[in-house]
Amino acid sequence: GDYTGAQNPLTITNVTSDMTVTADFRQVQTYTVTFVSGTGGTLTGELSQQIVPGGNCTAVTAVPSDCYEFTGWQGDYTGDESPLVITGVASDMTITATFSRAVYTVTFNTEPGGRLEGNARQSVECDQSTQPVEAVPRNDNFAFKRWLGDYKGTQNPLILQNITRDLTVTAHFVDLTNQPPAKPDLTFPPDNANITPEDLTLTWSAYNDPEADPLMRIHLRICRKDDPSWCV
């Protein structure tokens, strides 16, 4: 028209004749960026976005379902960021989030005194079970006592079920040659005599361990002299 330019708002100055000015509108080109979720998860954010050339998407986050892990993006973009923001968009794009079943490591260890039969390091899918592992004493001088660590119990062979995280368990053995005597000998006081300081009776006992075991026990008992039934 009688004015050419992009000023907006427009003010015409120094008008000296009739003028006709026409506003020209053009459709802005945009690209479509589409986000798709694969099996095993969902997406949060705007999944279909109209972006001007060179513009940026808003963030989209991949959320794995139970027993799944997010493994990355495929399609017109590859990577493993989450949330994901696509910058400098220059074409239509379709991007797919991929997920896989979670796999955990279960480790079986043993203390001195025994060994394990079975696979001591297992890769187990989420919610599945391990293969059996058996704790076996090294010889007749040892005995399997229990499992310690992320599982505590005496099941043997051991099968761990419904695995939902990495686990480590250890077989615990006891040395049968280093145990307290089954029936210790009372060595003091003679004939289980009472020591009676004033109003109280103090009874204590030391047991002789012929194996020189460090687990020797001393028992103390204090009773009222005037009421033998009152003891601590």
Image (cartoon, rainbow, N blue to C red):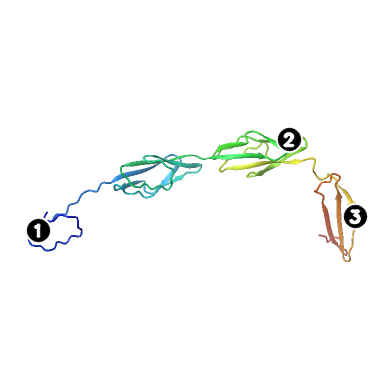
Q: Which residue is the site of mark 2?
A: 138
Estimate the x, y position of residue 161 in percent, counting from the top left. 59, 39
Dot 1 amino acid type: Met
Dot 3 amino acid type: Pro
223 shown above or below 97? below
Secondary structure under badge 2?
Answer: loop
Q: Which residue is the site of mark 1?
A: 19
Query: Farthest residue toward the front?
Result: 14
Circle 3: is it few (<14), some (14-19), or many (20+) Cα within 10 Å? few
Estimate the x, y position of residue 185 in percent, counting from the top left. 88, 48
213 shown above or below 116? below
Q: CA distance from mark 2 to mark 1?
A: 107 Å
Query: Farthest residue toward the bottom?
Result: 198
Circle 1: is it few (<14), some (14-19), or many (20+) Cα within 10 Å? few
Secondary structure under badge 3?
Answer: loop
Left or right of 204, for residue 159: left
Query: Farthest residue toward the left?
Result: 17
**Mark with earlier residue (2, 1):** 1
Dot 2 amino acid type: Arg
Q: Residue at x 80, y 40 (%)?
A: 177
Q: Nearer the viewer, mark 3 or mark 2?
A: 2
Q: Residue at x 85, y 61 (%)?
A: 223
Q: CA distance from mark 1 to mark 3?
A: 127 Å
Left or right of 117, for residue 232: right
